[in-house]
Structures are given as structure tokens and as C-alpha cells.
Amino acid sequence: MFAIPEQFSAATKSQLEAQLAIMNSFAGTAFESMQKVVDLNLNVVKSSLQESSAAAHQLFTAKDPQEFFSLSSAQAQPTAEKAIAYSRHLASIATSTQAEFAKTAETQIAETNRKVMSLIEELSKNAPAGSENAVAILKSAIGNANASYDQLSKTAKQAVETLEGNLTAAASQFVNAAEKTTSRSRKPA
């Protein structure tokens, strides 16, 4: 007779442990991603300082204004390429983090659904006569929630793919514009 409250208690404890595990996983993934971003930024700052020092030295040693402008325009192309590479690397970190979050969430949701369905099956075996409709409604609600989650997951993945496509297109346009600007500034007047 007391099996149902014990089942709910065990299910609740299991659910809380699962939520704690998923939060720990999310926190670990977020920390790793932030560490990657910090490392990327430190590397960019270090190389930028070195390159800026070298570029400033070249500009200060220019013999005439034409050489000065030629050197400065020649530096525009590599700078644009480095900015694009940085944004791609940053987008890659964000994409991999999102994928890891999605994978963790999908695994957790699948496991939770399995446990809930198992609990419902067990309860339906011990349910009083006439409660079949309530059990069917509960199973239907869980099925609808799963379908909604699947649709939301597909939509989120499409949004990420669209964002990646837009970033790639914008980066290509930026490179083309930088190349045109650089080639125009190199032409003799």
C-alpha cells in the first residue's frame, strides 16, 4: 500500500540528482568554453602587440609619405584576415559549446523521460479500476511534451546553422571589401 509514495520519493530524489548532474555538466562546459575564449584573447593580444610594434617601426622608418601610405595600406589586408580568423574561431567555440549543451540536455531529457514512463507504467499497474483514462491522458501529455521538445531542438539547430551561414557570408564580404580597398590603395596615382 505504501509503495506509491516510496516510488514518488525515489523518483523525486533521482530527478534532483539528475538535475544537479546536468547543472554540473553545464557549468563545466561553460567554464571550458570561457577558458578557450580567454586563451584565444590572450594569444590575439600578444600577437597584436608584437605585430603593432613591428608595424609602427616600419611606419616610422618610411622615407616619404607615399611609402608610409603604401605600408599602412599593406597592413590592412592581414589585419582584416586576422579579424575574420578570430571571429571564426570565436564562432567555433560558441558552436561547440552549444552542441555540448544540446547533447547533455538531450541525454538528460531522454533519461528523465524513460524514468517518468517507467514510473507511469508502474503506477498504472497499481492504479484503481477506472483510472485508465487518467493514465492515458498523462501518457499523451508526456508524448506531446516530447514532441514539442523535439521541434524546439530542431528549430534551435536550424537557427545555429543559419547564424553560422550568415557569419561566413559576412566574413567573405568583409574579405572582398578589404581586398578591393587594398588593391585600390596599391595602384599608383
Image: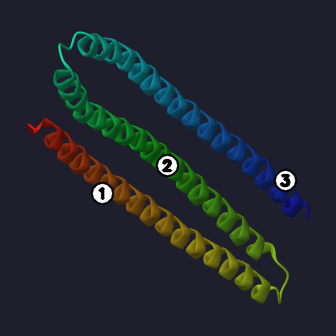
Crowding around mark 1 (Cα neighbors within 10 Å: few <14, some 14 to 19, many 20+) is: few
Quarter that holds the N terminus: bottom right
Q: Is 25 above or below relative to 11?
A: above
Q: Secondary structure at mark 3?
A: helix
Q: Secondary structure at mark 2?
A: helix
Q: Quadrant of residue 25?
A: top right
The residue singled out by tag 3 in the image is 9
| Kind of residue at disc 2 | Gln
Mark 2 vs mark 1, foreground winner is 1
- In the rendered image, residue 149, in percent from the top left (x then y), is placed at 58, 68
Q: Residue at x 24, y 44 (%)?
A: 178
Q: Quadrant of residue 49?
A: top left
- In the rendered image, residue 125, in percent from the top left (x then y), is placed at 74, 74
Quarter that holds the C terminus: top left
Sequence-first tag of 3 and 2: 3
Observer-nearest residue: 139 or 87?
Answer: 87
The residue singled out by tag 1 in the image is 169
Crowding around mark 3 (Cα neighbors within 10 Å: few <14, some 14 to 19, many 20+) is: few
Sequence-first tag of 2 and 1: 2
Q: Please, which residue is most extreme toward the right here?
A: 2
Observer-nearest residue: 35 or 11?
Answer: 35
- In the rendered image, residue 75, in percent from the top left (x then y), is placed at 24, 28
Q: Are marks 3 and 1 in contact (CB under 8 Å)?
A: no
- Total numbered labels placed on residues in the image: 3
Cα distance between the residues tagged 2 and 1: 21 Å
Q: Residue at x 22, y 28 (%)?
A: 69
Q: Quadrant of residue 92?
A: top left
Q: Is residue 49 left or right of residue 152?
A: left
Question: Residue 32 — which label?
Answer: none
The residue singled out by tag 2 in the image is 98
